[in-house]
Amino acid sequence: MSAHSITEPSATTKWISGGLVVAYAVITLIPLLWIVATGFKTPADAISYPPKVVFDPTLEGYVNLFTTRTRVTPEQLEALPPPANFAEEIVRSYDMVIAGPSRFGERFLNSVIIGFGSTFLSVFLGTLAAYAFSRFKIPLKDDLLFFILSTRMMPPIAVAIPIFLMYRQLGLSDTHLGMILLYTAVNISLAVWLLKGFIDEIPREYEEAALIDGYTRFQAFVKVVLPQAATGIASTAIFCLIFAWNEYAFAVLLTSGTAQTAPPFIPTIIGVGGQDWPAVAAGATLFLLPVLIFTILLRKHLLRGITFGAVRK
Amino acid sequence: MTNSVITAAAKATPPTVARRIRGLSDRAIAWIFVAPTIFLLLAINIFPLIWTVQLSFTDYRANRLNREVEWVGLRNYERILTDDGIWMNMQATAHFLVWTIVFQVLIGFALAYLINKKFKGSALWTTIIVLPMMLSPAVVGNFWTFLYQPQIGLINYMVEFFTGIPASSFSMLGSVTLAPWAIVIVDTWMWTPFVMLICLAGLRSIPDYIYEAAEIDRASKWRQFWTITVPMVLPFLMLAVLFRGIENFKMFDLVVQLTGGGPGSITELASINLKREAFEKWRTGYSSAYAVILFVTIFGLASIYVKALNKVKAR
């Protein structure tokens, strides 16, 4: 289209549209920025009224997030050696000492293991299945594809009870492997459908040339199709990771200790007299960070990924 | 349901020219590649679903292993369908569902329409708008309880700032009239971008020549909007509504963290109530029947809806 096409909006239209969109974006951003800002407030600043927009930033929230602390008497405090780092310094000013790490680090690590584990597995299995569905004659192909899709309509709670019972029998409850398998099962429908869309777009002639050159079907898949599908695989992986990273219902129903991820944990961070909001905000900020980075890196594929699902479903 | 679409896609792929040359046969590869996915789905989706159905006819309780399990037939179903409390939960769910969809469709479509004007920096602002849907609903819900605090929260402060209603005079999450709207607001904030992205895809799928032809016919902008833009985007919009509808029907995490179903049980959506029955009261058989009813409802509504959607598409 040329710049002077009749479908090109006028400069005024662009200004008004831009203004409205920016206004909405700013409203959207306020709660997010508030989370980040609260993470750097003292508990007193966090709950002051009117809400403080300008404040002295402190890392107290982060220190409280990563440590458990115990109160000591002033005499005991006197007897201690001088604080070794800023964390101790902050804690000492409240007549406390650091007793050890909190469980946040552990929960965060669980999120990483389960999130990346299930993403890897769903993309791995999803790529294989998508390739087969894209290239081969499979009996009842349409029914199978629809069956795969329909599993996503299942409310987690409808299957949570038997999965709970089944996992208890198999010794999978509250284990990383159990959660990885579960999230893989939830994500695989998305992975197959997205990846089938991407693989359908790769011309078959490439593989056929490779087959004629003496490659086996499997070699052609690995050496020709996979590199071509790399961007599709990457964006599918990010969608799967975002889901597994943020999932709450299964995590709260099926895990209690060793395999619990961060989403059920962050809301339970308690301080003196209720939730310790700076620590909660610090936890939320750290937890949001990877997703924010991915979203920014992903922005070009975002529309494509979502609409592949939309157009083909 | 969507078989027509799938069949069309399948027919579009040409038959393989190159046959197997050496190594595994294509048929074997197809099986090896598809089998793990099917197996996983059978093990973790279908098998549990069948088990749920079976449990729904019993009075099994998952926290008492040594208890004699009795087959009770349809009694669980009968009790659920005649329970007034459950109809209240269904109403709460319907309220949540209808209003979130209304707001998300209106705002989401408007935003997509504006962004499609391709103003300078639109990509950046789109990325910002999309951020909330990438976050964890539970974490978001938890943090919004802070924003909604009557004495210290940002929302009450802003309401006081703009309208003069004293911030301490109302509590978004504590009031029976306001709490359902409080959850609608957060869900709209979080999921409008999803509707927006799908509408944007719809808008971008409209070829320019249609507008050019309309321009030559001297159709007004208003008329172009209603006769070209809206009908062309409608199938996309309806898909967005389908996805949001399914998601919000089974909504759990956001609302659990925001209100926990309260105050009283005014925001107790069906899935929250189900969780209570299953994992707090441990009435496994009863809650399995409840789960089956919910699943059948989602599936039924979605099927009817998809039929309507296919009609719109075929037009």
Image (tube, coloured by chain):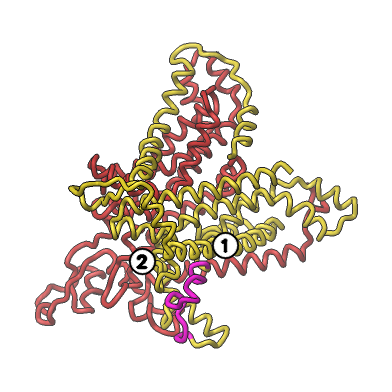
* Residue A196 sits above or below residue A273 on the image: above
Q: Which mark is residue A282?
A: 2
Q: Please state which of residues A120 and B53 is positioned toward the viewer in this rendering.
A: B53
* Residue A66 sits above or below residue B240 on the image: below
Instruction: Give the residue displayed 65% in from the left and 57% down from the top.
Output: B112
Q: Give coordinates of residue B192: x percent, y percent.
A: 57, 60
Q: Give coordinates of residue A205: x percent, y percent.
A: 60, 22
Indicate the amino acid at tag 1. Val
Question: Image check: B282 left or right of B113?
Answer: left
Indicate the amino acid at tag 2. Ala
* Residue B71 sits above or below residue A147 on the image: below
* Residue tagged 1: B98
Rendered hue of chain A is red
Q: Chain of mark 2?
A: A
Question: Image check: A235 left or right of B273?
Answer: right
Question: Image check: B184 left or right of B311?
Answer: left
Instruction: Give the residue displayed 52% in from the left and 85% down from the top.
Output: B160
How packed mark 1 is, by other alpha carbons closer than 10 Å (few <14, some 14-19, many 20 or more), is: few
The residue sitting at the top extreme is B21
Q: Quadrant of the C terminus of chain B?
A: top right
Secondary structure at numbered mark 1: helix
The region drawn magenta spans B167-184
